[in-house]
Amino acid sequence: MTDRIDELRERTRFEPSEVEPRIGERWLASGLFHPEPEGSAAENYSIAIPPPNVTGSLHMGHALNGSVQDTLVRYHRMSGRRTKWVLGTDHAGIATQTVVEKALLAEGSSREQLGREAFVQRVWEWREHYGSTIVEQFKRLGASCDFEQERFTLDEGYAQAVVRVFIALYQKGYVYRDRYIVNWDPGSRSAISDLEVEEREETDTLYSIVYDLDGGGSVTIATVRPETLLADTAVAVNPSDERYRDLVGRTAILPLVGRRLPVIADEYVKTDFGTGQLKVTPAHDPNDFDIGQRHGLEQISVIGEDGRMTAQAGERFEGLTVRQARTAVVAALEAEGRVVAQEPYKHSVPYSHRSGERIEPLISLQWFMRMDELAAPAIDAVVSGRVRIVPENHRRVYLDWMDNIRPWCVSRQLWWGHRLPVYYCEDCQETYVAAQSPGRCGACEGELRQDEDVLDTWFSSALWPFATLGWPEQTPELRAFYPTKVLSTARDILFLWVARMIMMGLEFTGEAPFDEVYIHSVIQAPDGRRMSKSLGTGIDPLAEIDRHGADAVRFGLLAMSSSQDVRYSVEKIQQGQALANKLFNAARFVLVNLGDVADLGADREPQPQTLEDRWILSRLQRIEADTAARIEAFDFSHAALGLYDFVYGELCDWYLELVKHRLGPERSAQERQALAATLVRVLRETVALAHPVIPFVTEELWSYLGGEELLVGSAFPRLDQTLIDLEAEAQVGRAIEAITLVRGWRDSVSARAALIVPARLNATGYEAMSHAIARLARLDLDPDGAGEHEPIASVSIPGGAVEIRSSEGLDLAAAEQRRAAGRAKLEQEIARLQTKLAKPGFAEKAPPAVVDGERVKLSRLEAELQAL
RNA sequence: GGGCGCGUAGCUCAGUUGGUUAGAGCACCUCGUUUACACCGAGGGGGUCGCCUGUUCGAAUCGGGCCGCGCCCACCA
């Protein structure tokens, strides 16, 4: 141990890059991150990590969420609960497939060329190579996940759970196949769900186009998508629109095509938009699709899944891209003189969140999932408080969405993912939904063919909290860790993922998958824009860890976080770095000076000898209680900043300064041992207290402070009521105030630090602290012949004043100015208080405690003014 | 169109149920080789709490209106 302390003497700085890998390895080797599956979920503590994409690398969102979850996990582990942080990654259908397709493209190949089987094989290989990147990055953050049991949403066991769920939902009639209008993403060549569509404001041209009516007259419709006119199957007006009452039932002639379109009446049509006459294109517009359903209209598809015009669009347009078709259709219409107006028009346009391409609504045969029955219990769970959403204002967002939930398109035209467990007979088209192919068609003995599609990635993610623990088997893991306690995430996947997990959890396990949903901030770029790779506004958390250390990044992110979006501020990260260094040096100072007498092996009772010893032990109890309460309330920002304030504002600035003089070798061994007992206790508890937030530096220090076990597996310090000492807090608090006031005065008279100023303490309440005041305010409180001279200056402090006895080395003229300013300020404040107290109504209506408080304050200020 | 939230010191943010002289970190200024830490210490300057208007003995805090900003949801061609 003495060798280590000698070595510590030289380490004047905390070096994260040296410490972190070493500590990280010890944690992993300890096995403490991997709990045995014992006990019940109620008594254990578990969190399921939002599985990052296998293709992903750690971004700020991961770093913040990782810090949040790890703080919770470490805190509860230290609180004595069997704690498991379930780790794993998501196969991320589109994202991963795209990455591998790009690689193939670079090789001059393609997935089509490879064929399905070889391609999927190729993706697995890719995953073997790169899939652990983000997991390793979480380790660098200090995340204490169960790395020994990493899951993947395409694991064999997981895949079985997915199949089982699909079949069960099919049997219940929730999952069904239908031809329906979907959001077609030409980029990924797949349908996507409503939630994966984002609206962007765009300015297009709004064309007004004249359609002739059979038998004379015309209608004028407005559209931003003239190319879809080729698929029109009706013209609609509002039934209450007086202007067009007699139009209903007549027939319009579709320009360029000549198709006869019935003029129908439908409530959807707004009378105050455009002409009030609407072209109806059921196959290429979701609203028109609905109108078509209501009126039994024909659905004509003119845009194909490849984003080109189909044969149905007619020879002139077949094969053109949508954009080319638009130009061509407009030109053709203009040639016929049918375009009567063109105006710029700003509206929102759907884009694929996945590929970034413009969504093409079209009719397609897809698998859907009806959600309303599943939503009902999931609504209940939140309404009843069984699942608590924090902060609460997100509750309503959740409930609103759930109340209006719509069917979910779950099939994707991809190769990478959970292939639908659906088989069709080649001959009679019979459909079989089963875990394994039934072999041959039961009806006609025909060949069976499995559906080509895979499931939406979010379908499998929805099972995450229980599928990762072995469901549907009743595994020990499932019993011990399901339901989990907290689901922590940003709000962007509240619907996409959280809501669906609640629904699936309730449906398949009968229990909500977690008790609480914590929704944390979104960290924005320093300029307030979104952090994103494409904007170039992203900040790489790993680079920040390299620069400042993982503790600093964790502290900074937690200190920044709140219930709303916040801008990234390096200053907070630096504050964390400073804290780690400060704590390191405080411990180092104590160990280097008291290492020879400190009994580090045992957790010795502190032996407070002085007021300041009692004071720090009392203050320590408060920060212990506060920190625990803040972590439990998800108030990470105050938890982190509160630790900073304690370490700086109480432990280092005051306690260590107050006891420095008691460390020296000139003191008796007994005295030094007693001090060491208190100091070591305070340091051990402080370090343990801060561990959930800044695990690396604290674990490192713990190894010096006599931790036999790793700190990560030790106990979180708890408030000891018997150590709360109001008397010590009051006395030391007063002394601190006095010292600060004298220091301010010293500065105003330009007293040099080395100058010990002769003075007399003419105040009550400082008996036990006068030596401390003398030392820290650099006063000689017992000068020879102190009583003989009149004081040449006076510094007022609570309960009296410090009378200055010599002007040597002091610039008293400079002080006068300051004193005058102080006096003016006091007078002003006194006047304010007097007015307030004299005001009719104040004394009668304000609570007595407040009135008394103001009176006390007034007399205190008057005394201070007097002293000046 | 609906919903949520925000506007407090130069910057990033705290400010419990309305009641100390509105705070912190960073930045800025002055001083400093005091038994750890210069990633340090001591001291200091800096705010009409977006604007207006109510309620109240008392408003950064509660109500109303306005201005500015962000996010989410939504089918107006």
Image (spheres, coloured by chain):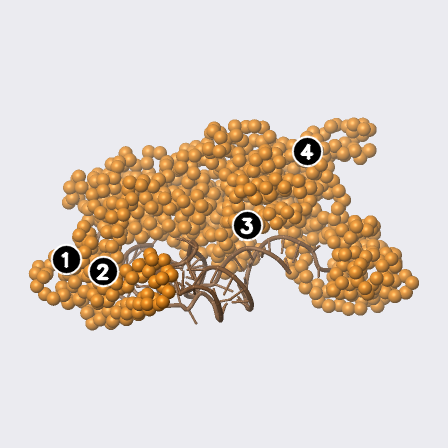
Distance from label 2 to label 3 (Cα)? 50 Å
Q: Secondary structure at mark 1?
A: loop
Amino acid, disc 3: His
Relative side of A773 to A351, left or right: left
Amino acid, disc 1: Leu
Question: Of the residues under marks 4 and 3, which one precedes in the sequence?
Answer: 4
Question: Of the residues under marks 1 and 2, which one precedes in the sequence?
Answer: 1
Q: Nearer the viewer, mark 1 or mark 2?
A: 2
Q: Secondary structure at mark 2?
A: strand
Distance from label 1 to label 2 (Cα)? 15 Å
Q: Badge 4 sits on which subunit?
A: A
Amino acid, disc 4: Ile
Q: Secondary structure at mark 3?
A: helix
For residue A287, which quarter of the picture? Answer: bottom right
> Pointer 3: residues within 10 angstroms few (<14), some, or many (20+)?
some
- Tell me the residue that label 1 is attached to: A781
Q: Nearer the viewer, mark 4 or mark 2?
A: 2
Work out whether residue A425 can be spotted.
yes
Question: Of the residues under marks 4 and 1, which one precedes in the sequence?
Answer: 4
Amino acid, disc 2: Ile
**Chain A painted colour:** orange
- On residue A797, the disc is 2
Question: Of the residues under marks 1 and 3, which one precedes in the sequence?
Answer: 3
- Tell me the residue that label 3 is attached to: A394
The quarter of the rendered structure image containing the C terminus of chain A is bottom left
- On residue A167, the disc is 4
Of A313 and A749, nearer the camera is: A749
Chain represented in brown:
B
Residue at 31% over, 61% down: A854
